[in-house]
Every structure is written in C-alpha cells, then in structure tokens.
Amino acid sequence: MNIQKELEQLSTVKTDLRFNDVDVMPETIYAIMINEVVPSCVEDDFYGRPDAAYMTTTIPLFRKAGIDVGSVQDILNRGIYITNAVKTPKTEYAVSKESIEDSLSYLEKELALFPNVKVIMLMGDVAKKAFNMISKKATKKNAVPSTSTYKLRNTEILYNGIRILPSYIMTGQNILIEKSKFEMASEDISMMYRLINNDLIN
C-alpha cells in the first residue's frame, strides 16, 4: 500500500499537504513515531533521499537505543513507521494551531491504516498537541496530560489499548546538541522497541 495514494483519496481538490510516498504493508507495522512537521525540502524528509536531513538525527537515535539501523527501510523492516503530524512545512519559527488542524484529518486517517499498532510515540510538543486533538474529538478528553514531557516519560498512557509514549522531537540538529534530550529520546525509542517485541513474543 502506498501511503501517499491512500491519503490523497481523502481530498477531491489538489492540496499543498505532503504525504509519505512510501510502500508499506500495514499489518507489519507495530509502532508509529509521529514527528512534528514536514521539512521545507521534500528530499530531506524520512522517505526522501538516503542522506535526508531527517535521517541524520533519526539513525543516531535508533543506534543509541541499541537498534542497528542504517536506513528508513531498516526501521520499517523492524515494524516501525515514521510520519509527521503537520503535512506542510513551517513558515514561521513556531508551528501554528491552524496548520496542525489543517493536517489533522489526514493524520487521523494515516494512523487508522495500521491495524496492529501497539505503540504510538509522540516526538515533540506538536505531535502531542495533534494527538490530543484527535483524542479530544473522539473521547472529549486529552489522551496525554498537559504536563512536561520529562514528567510523563514514566507514566503508562493508554489510548484504545495502544501505549502512548510522549518523547522529544527527533529532527533538527538541536537534538544532537542537547545531550539530555537525545539520551531521553533514545531511551524512549528503546522502550518502544521492547514493548513491540515483547508483544510479538507473547
């Protein structure tokens, strides 16, 4: 299944929104990582060129977590799908609530494509906000409490039986500089990997 083709069917008009042009077997995916926003250059996204900017931080995070990967395909092969909450590039420093809302129905549909997901990782505050908007629409309440990520990291958060792991943004060179966030994000990835593999063994 091609994700881009699936999501393009949602809209009758041509949209500026950018979707992952990648073929995935949905039933083989057990974890979804939601990053914040698509990059300004499509080639820099997770499924862009092999040395895409987004992968230059993602691969080190996975390796630090003890997961030996060298490409986004390696990550997919381990049952992990990565996407962005906001499907249009940032035009200002902060991501606006409007741009989150514009992408929300597509993100919701994208998450629904994967029937066997056990864990959803929210990589950064924008991903957390987007996921809470989805859960509020469905249940009238936030899935993730509005408190700092580091306080939530050891809390068991479940949404429709799926474990939700709030973590830190996984893209942008800052993650490589901010050692404590890099450390915590890689620990969270390690935990996600353990959770999906324990479920597969049991």
Image (tube, grey):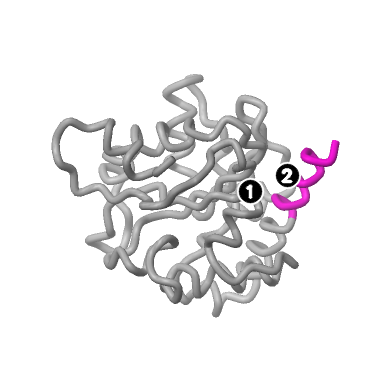
Q: For mark 2, what is the residue?
A: 196
From the viewer's perspective, tell me whether residue 65 is left or right of residue 92.
right
Residue at the spot 62% in from the left edge and 44% down from the top edge? 31
Which quarter of the picture shows residue 61?
bottom right
In the rendered image, which quarter contains the N terminus?
Answer: top left
Could you tell me residue 186's position as x and y percent?
67, 64
Q: Is residue 43 above or below residue 33?
A: below
Residue flagged by tag 2: what amino acid is it?
A: Ile
For the C terminus, the image quarter is: top right
Whichever of callouts 1 and 2 sits on the residue coming sooner in the sequence is 1
Name the dominant secondary structure of the magenta segment. Answer: helix
Q: Is the C-beta separation of discs 1 and 2 under 8 Å? A: yes
Provide the residue designation for mark 1.
79
**Region in magenta:** 191-202
Q: Is residue 197 magenta?
A: yes
Type of the residue with mark 1: Gly
Position above or below: 15 against 137? below
Badge 2 marks a residue whose secondary structure is: helix
